[in-house]
Image (cartoon, coloured by chain):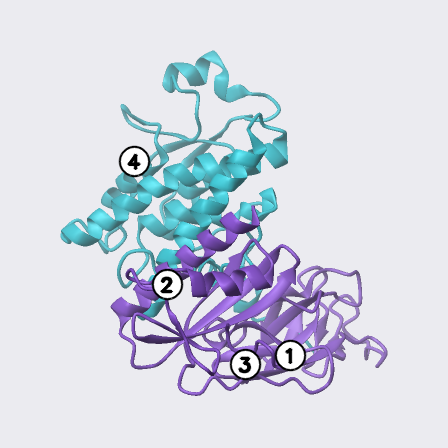
Chain colours: A cyan, B purple
């Protein structure tokens, strides 16, 4: 056994862990939690594990992790034999990654919450949360366009890191909240690059790239 | 004023060439028309009505295979001329000629993709100022967006306006192209010259964001 993931299929934060595990080719056990409409994440069993009542929860042996970005660091440090997803030997790059892990947390509260509002009627100040989501998408676009100007593509350095995985889901899912990607070309091309990674897995709202598969056609 | 102001144009800038790679598709708006703009495997550029003739799905959600654009919904494939080439649910069928995506005229000039709703797309020649900086959306009308670039200081100084309509910000030449998506949303494309270094380009990118703040405050 590697780890257990308390999982809700429509959650972008749960998807970060499913995606990272798939990219690292790690098998694990999922425990489905009925976030909606069951509100099972607020049940005594889950609250005993995670008093904050948030998903996902990751357990391995006696370890219990409740913060998504912490799970990504643990996954990379435990299962990434290449050492490239969380490069601990490069202080500047590691600090940049940590910056964007922090950003990913804010993005969950802006674009992520805007999506919950539109998709599941979640209580939120719609105008404020969508303004915050647009501000965050613009911050990411500015950074990714800088990377293009530098001849790069990924958030930090020359290859994908956990920062890309942390920022990917709620950016990719923002059209669920009516926030389309048309005016964000650097984001659009970066999203495509993540979806083209070997081992990529989809979720509802983020599909596989059909263009990469060879199939029939007269 | 940006390039193109006062010039009677039949075409509008929908994106930077740099930002649309071969075998990729993007959504664009030209003169109120919703478009799928895509490149085939040989770098050829196409602009179509963003609507699959089958069920109306946006073709910009589709994918490129070889020299065809395929709809994501049922996989119908369209040739470069817009004609339907293949219907997966009827693999033996030769699709009738009447099944066609509506095509628009599109060209690349000055590192920019230009679309016309007529049959002869033209682009503005920005001369040596054709190095792509970035595209960004302003939530305001075109005139307010254009004016904001002249009213936004770069490193403490307002940009100079040249007789060509181009700007010079901090010594760096800049061309600003605008695509009015709606009356309250404008897609801006910014070009500079090839000699401008990366640090200066990043500074210009932040100046664009400052201009957007000026414009959106004015529009609010």
* First in sequence: mark 2 vs mark 3: 3
- Where is residue A94 shown, x and y percent of the image? 21, 49
Cα distance between the residues tagged 2 and 4? 32 Å
Disc 2 marks which residue?
B205
Left or right: where B99 falls relative to A130 = right
In the image, residue B149 sits, relative to residue A45, either above or below, namely below
Disc 4 marks which residue?
A70
Q: Residue at x 39, y 37 (%)?
A: A106
Cα distance between the residues tagged 3 and 4? 41 Å
In the image, residue A200 sits, relative to residue A13, either above or below, namely below
Mark 1 packing: few (<14 Cα in 10 Å), some, or many (20+)?
many
Q: Could you tell me which secondary element the residue under label 3 belongs to?
A: loop
**CB under 8 Å between discs 2 and 3:** no
Evaluate whether label 3 is on the same chain as label 4.
Answer: no
- Where is residue B136 shown, x and y percent of the image? 49, 61
Cα distance between the residues tagged 2 and 3? 31 Å
Q: Residue at x 52, y 58 (%)?
A: B137
Disc 3 marks which residue?
B41
Q: Could you tell me which secondary element the residue under label 4 belongs to?
A: helix
Q: Residue at x 54, y 75 (%)?
A: B23
**Chain where mark 1 sits:** B
**Closer to us: mark 3 or mark 1?**
1
Disc 1 marks which residue?
B11
**CB under 8 Å between discs 3 and 4:** no
């Amino acid at each position: 056994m590697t780890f257990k993931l308390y999982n809700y299929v429509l959650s972008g934060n749960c998807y970060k862990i499913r995606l990272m595990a798939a990219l690292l080719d790690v098998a694990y056990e999922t425990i489905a939690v009925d976030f909606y409409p069951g509100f099972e994440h607020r049940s005594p069993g889950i609250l005993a594990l995670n008093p904050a009542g948030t998903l996902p929860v990751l357990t391995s042996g006696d370890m219990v992790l409740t913060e998504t970005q912490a799970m990504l660091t643990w996954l990379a440090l435990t299962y990434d034999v290449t050492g490239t997803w969380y490069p601990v030997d490069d202080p500047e790059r590691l600090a940049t990654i940590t910056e964007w892990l922090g950003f990913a947390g804010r993005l969950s509260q802006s674009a992520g919450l805007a999506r919950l509002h539109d998709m599941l009627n979640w209580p939120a100040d719609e105008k404020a949360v969508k303004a915050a989501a647009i501000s965050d998408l613009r911050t990411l676009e500015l950074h990714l366009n800088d990377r293009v100007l530098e001849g790069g593509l990924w958030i930090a350095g020359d290859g994908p890191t956990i920062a890309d995985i942390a920022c990917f889901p709620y950016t990719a899912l923002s059209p669920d909240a009516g926030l389309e990607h048309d005016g964000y070309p650097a984001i659009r091309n970066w999203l495509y690059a993540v979806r083209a990674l070997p081992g990529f897995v989809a979720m509802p709202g983020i599909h596989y790239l059909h263009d990469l598969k060879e199939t029939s056609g007269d | 004023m940006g390039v193109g102001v006062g010039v009677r144009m039949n075409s509008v800038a929908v994106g930077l060439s740099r930002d649309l790679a071969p075998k990729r598709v993007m959504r664009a708006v030209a003169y109120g028309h919703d478009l799928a703009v895509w490149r085939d495997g040989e770098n050829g550029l196409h602009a179509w009505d963003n609507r699959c003739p089958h069920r109306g799905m946006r073709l910009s959600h589709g994918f490129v295979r070889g020299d065809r654009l395929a709809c994501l919904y049922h996989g119908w494939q369209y040739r470069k001329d817009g004609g339907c080439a293949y219907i997966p649910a009827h693999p033996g069928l030769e699709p009738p000629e009447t099944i066609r995506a509506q095509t628009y005229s599109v060209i690349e000039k000055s590192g920019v993709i230009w679309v016309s709703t007529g049959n002869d797309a033209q682009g503005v020649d920005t001369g040596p100022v054709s190095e792509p900086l970035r595209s960004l959306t302003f939530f305001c009308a075109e005139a307010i967006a254009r004016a904001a670039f002249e009213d936004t200081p770069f490193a403490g100084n307002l940009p100079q306006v040249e007789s060509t309509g181009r700007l010079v910000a901090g010594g760096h030449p800049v061309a600003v192209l605008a695509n009015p998506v709606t009356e309250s949303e404008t897609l801006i494309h910014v070009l500079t010259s090839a000699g401008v270094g990366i640090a200066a380009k990043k500074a210009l990118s932040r100046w664009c964001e400052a201009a957007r703040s000026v414009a959106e405050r004015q529009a609010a």
